Structures are given as C-alpha cells and as structure tokens.
Image (tube, helix red, strand yellow):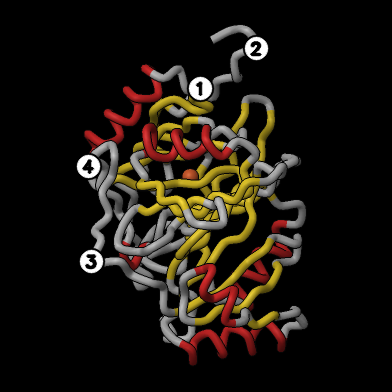
Amino acid sequence: MPSEAIEALGYVGLEVSDLPAWTSFASDILGLQALPRADGSIDLRMDNYASRFRLHEGPADDLAYMGWEVADVAALEATAERLKASGHDVRVGGAELCEDRRVGGLIQFRDPEGNPHEAFFGPLQQTERPFVSPAGVRFKTGRQGLGHIVLRCRDKDAMLDFFCGVLGFRLSDHILAELIPGRPMELSFLRCNGRHHSLALAPLKSPKRIVHLMVEALSIDDVGRAHDRCLEQHIHLSFTLGRHSNDEMLSFYPVSPSGFDIEFGWGGLEVEDESWHVLTHRSISAWGHKFQLPPRRGER
Ligand code: FE2
C-alpha cells in the first residue's frame, strides 16, 4: 500500500435530532463512552482516540461528515493533490477546525454524490484517560479504523471510480441479492486496510446518506450481551442476528434514534491484498439477518 494512501475510517460526525436519546443508545446499548463538550456536542469514544463518533444536535438525523485517516502531512498533501488533479474542490481545514476535530491537519472534499468527506492526520490520543466502556465492550479498531460505513448511491460506477481511482480504495467484492425482500440490488464493498470493507455502496433510494454504520466487538459474547440489551430495552432490530456471506461478520442491526441502522458485529474477515480475489456473492448472509419491518406506532 503506498504510504500516501487513505489508511482507515477514523471518525464520523452525525447530526441527530434527539441528542439525549442518542447518547443513551450509544452508551447503554452500544457500549461507547459518551463525553460532552462545551459546545453541547458529544464525543463517543471506543478506544484511545479522543473522538471516534461525534453527535451534533440538528434536524438531519444523518451523516454530518466522515474522516479518513492518512499517515502524515505528506500523505494529506498527496491526497489533496490527487483530488485537485481529478477536478475535485479541496478545502484545507484551518486551526479552529483541526482543534474541533482533534487532529493535526485535515482537508474537506465531496464525492460525486455530494457526501461530506474529510481526510486527516495526527488524531489526538488520550492514553492517559483510557477508554472505559459503560457496558464493558472492547472494540476492534487500531489499523482497521472504527468500523465501516455504508452509503446510499445513485451512480455506483461513478462512486467506484472516485474511491478506487482517486482515493486508492481496493474493491473487495459485490453482493447481488435482495437486501430487502423483493428489492434486488448489487452492493459493492471497498477496503483501505485489512478490514474487509471500511466503505460499502448501496444503490438505494433512501432519504438518508447513511445506510448503516458498523462497530466490531472483540468478543462474540459482547454481541450476545448487546443483543440482550436491545431485547430488554425494546430496541427494534432491522436485521436479526446472522453471519454475512462476504466479510463473515456475525452481527445484528439495531435501529438508531436517527432511523438508520447500526451493525453490531464480531469476527469480521481480514483481507490480505496479495491473495484476495474479487467475487460477486449471491446472498447477503450465510444464515440469519432476517429483515424486520419496524413496529407500527403504538405497537412494540
Ligand atoms: Fe455492514
């Protein structure tokens, strides 16, 4: 992998309409550590990084930005040059924005569908204040980043050209199947490190940019306990417990207070570039992951 390449999904900002509900979902259900800031936003920690998810109060209930980590300032400049050379606008983040994102430097840009991206280096680490999960969860992060994000898209070919051709992502595979019964579609999965995918593209006509966000626990028992917490708290599961066909993630999908799903998983595949070959899978899952309609108002 060239050293100037994007190395991981480092952080995600969300605009959420019900900040208290989201904070309690993130900490009590997912096991993230919620730390309020003076501006009213909430940092969610899952490891040594000072901020992995950030909750901003607002009406969108959707993605506010996603931050892709690069090695250093040279890698950030190389990324900016590649973006500019392919005709994309790049904004260099000033000191105030870097302080806000808790990074050494960053740029902002948009993909062909207008999704707000940032690339950054030098994330603030808080090793002197270790991450403490309120639910006792330990997450798989490190070089694999915080997990993965699935974005809706309208022109998948243009998006694949952008992420693979400009930003250096590698195609892991496709799934051609009915994600929701009666609605066949082809999803494409992209990686930027050993994690099978940090980004997936779903040709959905969803009103939201985010289809789902995935966090991965280090223990299968953490998945079981999170599943128990969802049942106890009557959190709707959009997809039941199951094992995915392509990245082998054992997971389930609680719906967040913003209406998009969080995939809570364990056991995701690690890809070695040298031996990997690209397949098209014909099913989403080896077992489970049954789609469930949300309960109607008044029902639970
Ligand atoms: Fe996923």
- Asked whether 129 or 68 is in front, the reply is 129
Circle 3: element type:
loop
Q: Residue 3 at what x, y percent from top left?
A: 42, 86
Quick one: quadrant of the N terminus?
Answer: bottom left
Q: Which mark is residue 219?
A: 4
- Where disc 4 sits, the SS reads loop
Amino acid of disc 3? Glu
Q: Which residue is mark 3?
A: 128
3D distance between C-alphas at marks 1 and 3: 37 Å
Residue 136 as seen in the image, left or right of residue 239:
left
Q: Earlier in the sequence, mark 2 or mark 3?
A: 3
The mark nearer the N terminus, 1 or 3, is 3
Provide residue 91's location: percent of width, then percent of height. Answer: 69, 80
Which residue position holds label 1?
236
The answer to which image quadrant residue 48 occupies is: bottom left
Q: CA distance from mark 4 to mark 1?
A: 23 Å
Distance (Cα) linking label 4 and label 3: 25 Å
Residue under the image location 59 percent in, 70 percent down: 118
